[in-house]
Structure formats: structure tokens, C-alpha cells
């Protein structure tokens, strides 16, 4: 994006595109490329504010000149085949990949997913669960066994057995042994999507049917609901109590936190106590401050205590968690943001979440209808029978196209053959047990169908969406123009040292110094030393401002003694460079003494320097910029001579 940002900031007409329209009259012809009136008019109005005043001939003529220059450069880039360079193809492809993403989702479904997530973020749910562990790609028979086990457990719960006791007994979640399956409060994006959906759909005290996630089957019970508490910022003082600590060590930790708490009650500063007592060294350096957090981000005891604090500056009594002891101080609270405020954050979270597949799948289903998708199950089954056990070892080969030429599905007048699917399988196979072979192949078939439809839709974006076509043309021409302009103007001006020197020599009177002064500034510790230094300074002026041995020896002797130290600054100054020099009005000779910050300062005006041309090294930035402009002008002249340009002025002036 760096190149395009730079290019778009330099060129006025960076939004030019060249979509042709056979229905419009030709406004301008550049070599064999015709541009319609409607195309130019759209570009012109996009880059000119015509609300205040209608288009006039001058603005149309001026813009047409810029437009022609732009077109000439793009034409030249294509002439020398910059658009066939692999670097260009890769860069444009990278931009297209990013720009196409919004077009490859179901926008309606996407908005619904966003709204669903936000609505859930507005609430907190407290739930307990029992896990029956099961591999994500388990065999059907194992899945059935796990599901039936979950049903039996649910039956026990519905019969009145305590959820926590049953969880401790049968749950495959190791934490259930200590928490009885209680997960505490959580909100959207803190559990896997399938689990979250079930939890937010239950009423308080309702027990779910077995719910499948990648971890296995879950039985959920919602025990509480509340409005989202928002975000909170706190500081804490922590004294750790490691697991398996000895009783005496536990007592030492307790006494330490109580000592810190008592000091706070006596009026000690929280930050100072955190730095002194807290074992959380990362936050202790910041006075105990922690990042903002919300529901489910801290252990329950810490979270409940933190959100229980009412006023900024309030701090808690020592509270114990699984990490040790804490004293928590409230710094600030804020409610959950609005939908618009959180929309970008929610989008980013969805992109990393299973719910992102819903939008893509919804689009695929719509496209199947739009493109009249039809599947030939007979030919699919026939192909699957040809897959042997080498597939389970990851060494299977697709076979020949001649033998696998039957269609397996069709859409948009495109027929996808058995061979095309076979090649996809060959590239995406992995080792698997024979018992799961058909399941895996059917899963890969679904993937292949979705990919085929989405790839086709991607290839049609320029045809279906004019705004996408215009945008891609802008990026296409922008990258080309940047590369060629860099080669012909920007980098050339920097690298062509001989050409730059010749250019400077030809126009050096354009880069003039203003009148300057050669001056020496003497800073002395007191009036007595200043009196002696003034005599030396007068002698220096007489001798042409050479370094006098006397002053050099004096400065050398005194430089390490602050009470005697004399500073000397020789230089050439412009008006405004130095206030003390300016105060002399540039009168030749020595100025009066000035008292500046307990020092005695005087200036020797040695010489007035009349305006002179700057050396190339003194004006290189300005000269280089002007040389670039010169190269651009000369380049345009060359292009104008190389390519023919015809403008229908009468048609141009009909634009209002």
C-alpha cells in the first residue's frame, strides 16, 4: 500500500479508470485507445467539486491535459511491458485478494452475525457444563456411544440429581473435579461458538440437550444471567501463594498482605505500597495498574471484588484467589460501547471465530441458486469407488483425465469433472484410517464444491460490480504509473549525479543565499574575563578571524573549570538564526556586552557576506525536486511526440 499512498498523494488524477462504453461518443483518442465522454465526465466530476460552480472551459481543458498525461504514462508502461513483470502481477494480485473479500460474503448474513454477536455481548451468562470428550472427526459409532452417554447423564439431571455432583463424577473436563462444572460468567466470543449459542438460548435452570463442539458433547445448565458489566480498570497489590505451599508460608503471605492493607488504611500511597509489596512485578512498576478487562477475563473472586467497588479510588480488603492474596483499587469503569463503536472489533473477532463460516456458506447457497447448481451423485459415487487404500496412506494419485471425464456437478454453464475433483483430492489428502475414508472424501467434496463456486464468483467480480472494476483499474494503473514514474523521474533525479550537477549549474542563480554575516559569539563567566577576551577578539578581527593562539590556550586551560570557562562559537548566520547576532544589527566589529543567563556574551561581526548562489550540496533537496519536475516535463514532451492525441473539444464543452 506504500506505493499507492505515495502515488495517490502526488497525482491529481489518480482515480482515472478506463472502462470503455460502446454506447457513448468518443471524446479523446490516444493512439488506438478511445475514451468516451461518459467515462471522462465521471472521472472529472469525481475529482472536481461542481456544487459551487458548473464546469467551465478552462477547468475542462486543464483537466483534459492532466488526463492525457496520465493516459500517456500508462500507455508507455504497457508498451514496455511493465504490466507483464511478475512483481507487478504479484502486487496487483495481493491488492485484489484484499479488495475482493467484501464481495465474497453474504452481506445480509454478515450483518445478522454482527448484530447477533453484539446482542450477546450486552449480556453475561453463568453456566455449568458436563463434557463427554469426543474427537472432532470421530467415527459414527463412537459418536453414537458418546451421544447416548450424554443422554443418560441428562436424564439423571432431569430426575433431580445435583448438577455439580454429577459433573464431578462423570465430566471429562478436568476442572469439574474442583468447580463442579461451573464456568462462571461469560459473554460472546469467550466460548466456542456452538457452546455460546446453546448457552445464550437457555433459560435459567434449564438443562440443554447434548450439544456438539470440537471437544465432544456438552450438557449445559444456565444458572444466572445479567446485563454486561462493561469494562473496568483497576490496580492491585498481589502476594502470591504457590500451590502446595507449606502452612507457615501461607501464613507469611497472609501477614504480608495484611501489613500492606494496614499501611493503606494509615494513608500510604497505593502506588508506593504496590511497588514495595506486590509480587506481580510487571504491574508493580506501574503502581499495580492492570489493563482494562471485562467479564470472564479474571478469576471469579477477583472479578466479583473488582466490579463490586463503587467509587474511583476505593480499594478492597484482601481477597484470596487461586493465585494468592490481592488488594484491588478501582481506577475507572466504562459501559459496553455502542454497536457502531464496537463493529470493527466484532468483525475482527468473527474473522477468527467459527461463525465466520456462516456468512461464506450463506453466500455459496445463494450462488448455487443464482448459477443453477446441479450435482450428479451417480458420477460422484462411481468416482469414489475408484479410490483405493493408498489414499489412507497419503500416497494416492489422481489417475488420468481420459478415465475420469464424467461431470460431477454443473453451475453457470461450467461442468466440473471427476478428474478435477481427483486432482483436488490428490493435493489435499492426508493419512486417515480406512473406516473414515468415505467421511473424509465427502467432507473434501463439500470443500471442493464451495471453493469452485467461490473461485468462479471471484473471477466474475469485475463483470458483476462496476465499482469493483473501477477500483481494480485504479490499482492497476496506479502501480504501473508509480513504477514507471519512479524509473523515469524520482529515482533518476537522485541517481543521476552528472545530470543533477549540470541542471544546478544551468539554474544556480535560482538558489541564492540571502545576505549573511560571518560572526563569532563569545560567552564569558564574568565581566573581568570578558574584558580580556574582547581584546583578543579585536585582534582576531584584525587578523582576519584566524584562531589566535592566545584565545585557544585560554579556552583550553579553562574548559574544565566552570567558573572560568569561555565558550567561542564561530559561524555564518542568516537573519533569524541567532537572536544575539541579530541584536547587533550586523554592525561590523564588537557588540556591547549582553548579560544572558548569568553569563557575559558579546559578538564580533567579522564580515558581511552579500547574496551568493548556493553550492549543490547546500541546496540539494530543492535542486533535486526541481530536477524531478524538469525530467517530468521533458518526459511528457517525449510521450506527446511519440503517441497521437485527438480531443473532440466540441463534445468536451458539453460537460456541465
Image: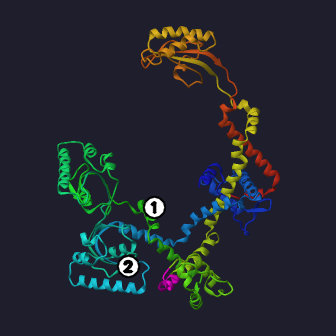
Report the side of 263 relative to 526 (left or right).
left
Instruction: Indicate whether residue 439 is drawn in magenta.
Output: yes
The residue nearer to you, when weighing 623 against 88, is: 88
Secondary structure character of the magenta stretch overall: helix
Q: Quadrant of residue 387?
A: bottom right
Q: At 19% across and 51% down in the image, what residue appears?
A: 252
Which mark is on residue 134?
Answer: 2
Residue 474 point in image, percent of width and height:
65, 59
Secondary structure of the residue carrying numbered label 2: loop
The residue nearer to you, when weighing 500 against 644, is: 500
Mark 2 surroundings within 10 Å by alpha-carbon count, few (fewer than 14), some (14 through 19), many (20 or more): many
Structural distance between the alpha carbons of marks 2 and 1: 35 Å
Residue 519 point in image, percent of width and height:
58, 18
Q: At 46% across and 16% down in the image, what residue appears?
A: 565
Disc 2 or 1, which lies upstream in sequence?
2
Report the side of 146 relative to 306 (left or right).
right
Mark 1 surroundings within 10 Å by alpha-carbon count, few (fewer than 14), some (14 through 19), many (20 or more): few
Quarter of the image that includes the N terminus: bottom right
The residue nearer to you, when weighing 36 against 270, is: 270
Residue 468 point in image, percent of width and height:
61, 66
Secondary structure of the residue carrying numbered label 1: helix
Instruction: Tell which tag, 2 or 1, sits nearer the viewer.
Output: 2
Q: Quadrant of residue 415?
A: bottom right
Residue 74 point in image, percent of width and height:
72, 56
From where the camera sits, is residue 656 visible? no
- The residue that mark 1 highlights is 344
Residue span colored magenta: 432-442
Quarter of the image that includes the C terminus: bottom right
The residue nearer to you, when weighing 29 against 358, is: 358
Q: What is the count of numbered marks?
A: 2
Amino acid at each position: 500500500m506504500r506505493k499507492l499512498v505515495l502515488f495517490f498523494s502526488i497525482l491529481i488524477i489518480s482515480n482515472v479508470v478506463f472502462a470503455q462504453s460502446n454506447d457513448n461518443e468518443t471524446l479523446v483518442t490516444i493512439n488506438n485507445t478511445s475514451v468516451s465522454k461518459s467515462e471522462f465526465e465521471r472521472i472529472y466530476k469525481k475529482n472536481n467539486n461542481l456544487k459551487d460552480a458548473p464546469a467551465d472551459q478552462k477547468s475542462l481543458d486543464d483537466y483534459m491535459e492532466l488526463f492525457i498525461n496520465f493516459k500517456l504514462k500508462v500507455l508507455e508502461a504497457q508498451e514496455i511491458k511493465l504490466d507483464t513483470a511478475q512483481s507487478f502481477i504479484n502486487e496487483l494480485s495481493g491488492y485484489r485478494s484484499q479488495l475482493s473479500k467484501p464481495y465474497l460474503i453474504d452481506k445480509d448474513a454478515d450483518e445478522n452475525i454482527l448484530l447477533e454477536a453484539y446482542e450477546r455481548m450486552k449480556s453475561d451468562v453463568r453456566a455449568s457444563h458436563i463434557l463427554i470428550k469426543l474427537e472432532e472427526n470421530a467415527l459414527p459409532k463412537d459418536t453414537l456411544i458418546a451421544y447416548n452417554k450424554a443422554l443418560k447423564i441428562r436424564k439423571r439431571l432431569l430426575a433431580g440429581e445435583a448438577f455439580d455432583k454429577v459433573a464431578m463424577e462423570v465430566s471429562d473436563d478436568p476442572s469439574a473435579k474442583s468447580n463442579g462444572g461451573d464456568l462462571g460468567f461469560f459473554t460472546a466470543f469467550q466460548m466456542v461458538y456452538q457452546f455460546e449459542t446453546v448457552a445464550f438460548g437457555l433459560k435459567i435452570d434449564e438443562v440443554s440437550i447434548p450439544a456438539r463442539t470440537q471437544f465432544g458433547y456438552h450438557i449445559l445448565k444456565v444458572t444466572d444471567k445479567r446485563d454486561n458489566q462493561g469494562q473496568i480498570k483497576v490496580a492491585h497489590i498481589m502476594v502470591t501463594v504457590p500451590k502446595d505451599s507449606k502452612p507457615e508460608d501461607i501464613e507469611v503471605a497472609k501477614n504480608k498482605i495484611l501489613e500492606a492493607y494496614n499501611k493503606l488504611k494509615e494513608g500510604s500511597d497505593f502506588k508506593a505500597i504496590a511497588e514495595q509489596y506486590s509480587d506481580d512485578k510487571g504491574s508493580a512498576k506501574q503502581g499495580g495498574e492492570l489493563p482494562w478487562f471485562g467479564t470472564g477475563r479474571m478469576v471469579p473472586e477477583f472479578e466479583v471484588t473488582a466490579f463490586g467497588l463503587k467509587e474511583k479510588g476505593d480499594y478492597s480488603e484482601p481477597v484470596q484467589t487461586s493465585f494468592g492474596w490481592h488488594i484491588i483499587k478501582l481506577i475507572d469503569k466504562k459501559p459496553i460501547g455502542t454497536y457502531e463503536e464496537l463493529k470493527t472489533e466484532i468483525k475482527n473477532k468473527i474473522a477468527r471465530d467459527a461463525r465466520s463460516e456462516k456468512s461464506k456458506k450463506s453466500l455459496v447457497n445463494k450462488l448455487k441458486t443464482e448459477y443453477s447448481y446441479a450435482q450428479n451423485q451417480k458420477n460422484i459415487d462411481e468416482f469414489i469407488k475408484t479410490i483405493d487404500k493408498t489414499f489412507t496412506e497419503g500416497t494416492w494419485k489422481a489417475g488420468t483425465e481420459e478415465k475420469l471425464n464424467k461431470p460431477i456437478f454443473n453451475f453457470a454453464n461450467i461442468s466440473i469433472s471427476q478428474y478435477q475433483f481427483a486432482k483436488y483430492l490428490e493435493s489435499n489428502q492426508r493419512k486417515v484410517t480406512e473406516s473414515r475414508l468415505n467421511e473424509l472424501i465427502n467432507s473434501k467434496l463439500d470443500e471442493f464444491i464451495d471453493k469452485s463456486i467461490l473461485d468462479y464468483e471471484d473471477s466474475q467480480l469485475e463483470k458483476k460490480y462496476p465499482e469493483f472494476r473501477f477500483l481494480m483499474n485504479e490499482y492497476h494503473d496506479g502501480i504501473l504509473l508509480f513504477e514507471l514514474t519512479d524509473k523515469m523521474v524520482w529515482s533518476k533525479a537522485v541517481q543521476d549525479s552528472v545530470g543533477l550537477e549540470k541542471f544546478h549549474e544551468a539554474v544556480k542563480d535560482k538558489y541564492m543565499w540571502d545576505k549573511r554575516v560571518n560572526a563569532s559569539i563569545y560567552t564569558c563567566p564574568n565581566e573581568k574575563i570578558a574584558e580580556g577576551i574582547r581584546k583578543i577578539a579585536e585582534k582576531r578581527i584584525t587578523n582576519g578571524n584566524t584562531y589566535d593562539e592566545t584565545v585557544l590556550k585560554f579556552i583550553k586551560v579553562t574548559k574544565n573549570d566552570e567558573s572560568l570557562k569561555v565558550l567561542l562559537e564561530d559561524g555564518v548566520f542568516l537573519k533569524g538564526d541567532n537572536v544575539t547576532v541579530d541584536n547587533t544589527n550586523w554592525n561590523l566589529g564588537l557588540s556591547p556586552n549582553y548579560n544572558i543567563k548569568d553569563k557575559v556574551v558579546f559578538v564580533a561581526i567579522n564580515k558581511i557576506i552579500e547574496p551568493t548562489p548556493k553550492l549543490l550540496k547546500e541546496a540539494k533537496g530543492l535542486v533535486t525536486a526541481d530536477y524531478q519536475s524538469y525530467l517530468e516535463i521533458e518526459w511528457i514532451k517525449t510521450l506527446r511526440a511519440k503517441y497521437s492525441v485527438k480531443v473532440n473539444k466540441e463534445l468536451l464543452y458539453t460537460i456541465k
